Amino acid sequence: MTAQTATITATSTGAGGFVGGTIAAGLLALEVRVVAVDLSFDAGTRARLAGATLVEADLSAGFPDMPRADLFIHAAALTTDAATLGITPAAHVRANMAPLLAALDHAADTRPGAFVFLSSTGVFAATDGTPDLTDTCPPTAIHPYAAAKRAGELLVPAALDGICPAHVVRLGYLYGPGEAARPTRTNLSLVARWIDAAAQGQPLTVPADDPRRDWTYAPDLGPALLRLTAAAPAGRPLHLTSGHVLSDAQLARLIAQTHPGTTVRLGPALGAKPPAVPSAIPALDGFPWTAPKAGLAALMSRRTAA
């Protein structure tokens, strides 16, 4: 499955958010016909997805009547924790699982060319890793979001067996354009927070333990998924990450360099999970993952233009 066929139709759930919206925008740039599905789309996302068909629907109530897609990407997710939302852990799990089950029902009815479930290295805890997170590390999955993602990793291949190819990928730390605080994702990436702090003349606070993290420029995900789904599923969750690993201090200094006078200071230790090691994915051999310095430059350029 490649963009050169010029007839690919992709359906992407969660496209009103940062990750889903960025993937949908990336597919549009490759001339893929995109149907973007979410509860709602703000004005900025509508502008980013100009040319896509936007479908507003509450997937917890079932999937809307839509035609078959060549590529179905399930990115809908509630990452804000249950306590912040004022709901129970059980309700949080339900909020993540109900849209997934609706998407699986839709896939069973329409048999897409390929189905992608976007999981997360959030299934791991800070104590996981040997020392880093490979796709053979058993995930701890100890909180509602992690448990729902881990359940999805197991359910998707089982539910779609004999129906369509099912790919399960874990995303790591992401940054890129289009980040905004939303009820479903109230926390911005460190990159976005540090860029905002630097623009306001504030110091960039780095955890005292200075964790190492894998950083992936989110606009790379759409092209990467097109390549990935051109091949048969791996039969296990894959780490779809760039392989670019920086400590928080290294990343903060890159951002500080773009704003003369910005300082980097230490804050409380954080205890973050280790970086994810990219899976060996033959279809992505030679893929041009954007390096952090180039990604930051592109992001700064977009912000300046805006």
Image (cartoon, rainbow, N blue to C red):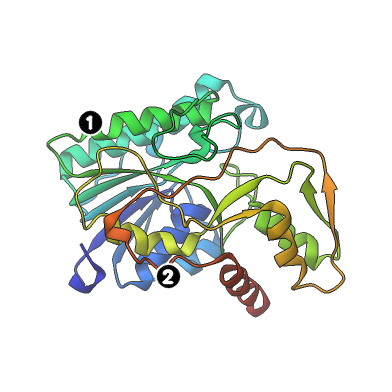
Q: Tell whether label 2 touches label 1 (CB within 8 Å).
A: no
Q: Which residue corresponds to the image point at 45% horizontal and 53% vertical from the top-left?
A: 241
Of 61 and 124, nearer the camera is: 124
Image height of 99 relative to 260, above or below: above
Give the residue type that dot 2 points to. Ala
**SS state under label 1:** helix
> Circle 1 sits on which residue?
159
Q: Residue furthest left?
A: 162
Q: Residue furthest front?
A: 130
Image height of 259 relative to 96, above or below: below
Any part of residue 16 in sight? no
Give residue 253's position: percent from left, percent from top.
Answer: 75, 63
Q: Which residue corresponds to the image point at 34% horizontal and 50% vertical from the top-left?
A: 280
Q: Is residue 166 left or right of residue 29?
A: left
**SS state under label 2:** loop
Tell me where residue 43 sits by quadrant: bottom right
Give residue 62's position: percent from left, percent from top.
Answer: 32, 35
Alpha carbon separation for disc pair 1 and 2: 33 Å
Of 208 and 147, nearer the camera is: 208
> Circle 2 sits on which residue?
50
Image height of 166 relative to 305, above or below: above
Give the residue type that dot 1 points to. Ala
Name the quarter where the N terminus is drawn: bottom left
Q: Which residue corresponds to the image point at 27% horizontal and 58% vertical from the top-left?
A: 283
Image height of 150 relative to 292, above or below: above
Q: Which residue corresponds to the image point at 77% horizontal and 66% vertical from the top-left?
A: 256
Q: Is residue 158 left or right of residue 212?
A: left
Tell me where residue 135 sits by quadrant: top left
Of 219 and 306, nearer the camera is: 219
